[in-house]
Image (cartoon, helix red, strand yellow):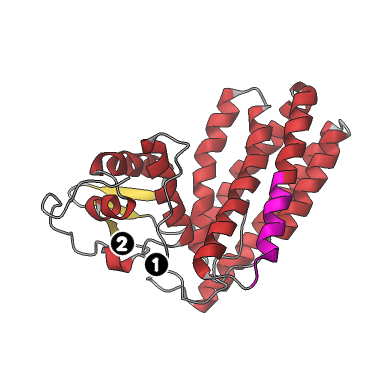
Amino acid sequence: MSGPSLAAASPPEAEGAFRESELVGDVPLLAPAWVLSERVYRAILQMLARGTLRRGATLHIGVLAKALGVSQTPVREALARLAATGLVVHEARKGYRIAPPLDAAGFRQLMDARRLVEIGAIGHACRLGGPAFRDELSKAFDTQSAEVSRLHAAHPVDRAERARLEWRVLEADLHFHEVILDHSHNRFIRFMADALKAQLHRIRQSAEQGLVDHGFALAEHRAILEAVMSADTAAAEGAMRRHMDLVEERALAEIALAARAGTPEHGPSSGPDEHQGVRR
């Protein structure tokens, strides 16, 4: 979809605003299955998670609209949604800028909140979900396993293709958790989980030297699934708690690694192995 020319309509760039030439990597294609506002929101979310947008930059609505081939209205709506999640920050008379990445203390708080929500959700889902829950969770795990296998088989691969495959792994991993949340049959649990989910993408901004952990996450999901299939609620809660503990351990190690390496202001390097860690 091609948007109108915005060259004349765009306001002057604020100091520190990113330019189209400063986008790092490919701009994601807008998936046709969603309405335009959702497609733009997800595309910008991918750009934030992949490091396509220069960290700390002021986000120029006109440049984003041109890069995505849309008008400025859905971009403005998407940025407002992202501001509500904390991924971007709105400043009066300055517009939006990318929020700073979470530090170790912030991530520990995030994981404390995730434990409260996700362990409770798996308990509710085990008690209330029934056969439909077990079937959907099994299918979600199979999808995640296939995506991880596809990523592992994709060597050598260019940076843009690897980023696309990693995003598919991330989406499949998150979907596994979403099935659990949906079958908790508690809209407030889902509401709280959705608020936390967006923060997970900030962890990808916290480290540029990615630790590969999608294989570990898959094994931990397998343990959760096995407990669910055995109708053992206590074991499922325990497996989820262990998953949360190990996610925290791996991510804190990655944040520390990035701090020692000194993450660059302008995002990832051009090497083929950045952003390999996928943390859920």
The secondary structure that most of the magenta stretch takes on is helix
From the viewer's perspective, is 185 left or right of 92? right
Q: Position of residue 260 (x, y in %)?
A: 54, 77
From the viewer's perspective, is 246 left or right of 206? right
Q: Residues within 10 Å of mark 2 (few under 14, many from 20)?
A: some
Give me the residue at 52% from left, 72% from top.
259
Which marked residue is nearer to the observer: mark 1 or mark 2?
Answer: 1
Rendered image quadrant of residue 166: bottom right
Q: Position of residue 45 (x, y in %)?
A: 44, 49
- The local secondary structure at tag 2 comes to loop
N-terminal label among 1 and 2 = 1
- The local secondary structure at tag 1 comes to loop
Q: Which residue is mark 1?
A: 24
The residue range painted magenta reads: 143-155
Give me the residue at 25% from left, 46% from top.
3
Residue 26 appears in the figure: yes
From the viewer's perspective, is 174 left or right of 159? right
The tag on residue 57 is 2
Depth check: give the residue in front, 101 or 3.
Answer: 3
Quarter containing the N terminus: top left
Depth check: give the residue in front, 40 or 266.
Answer: 40
Q: Residues within 10 Å of mark 1 (few under 14, many from 20)?
A: some
Disc 2 residue type (three-letter): Ala
Depth check: give the residue in front, 28 or 22.
Answer: 28
Give me the residue at 66% from left, 38% from top.
118
Residue 103 appears in the figure: no
In the image, residue 134 above or below residue 249? above
Disc 1 residue type (three-letter): Val
Q: Position of residue 239 (x, y in %)?
A: 79, 44
In the image, residue 58 above or below residue 190? below
Q: Position of residue 48 (x, y in %)?
A: 43, 55
Look at the image and say whether residue 142 sits in the magenta stretch. no
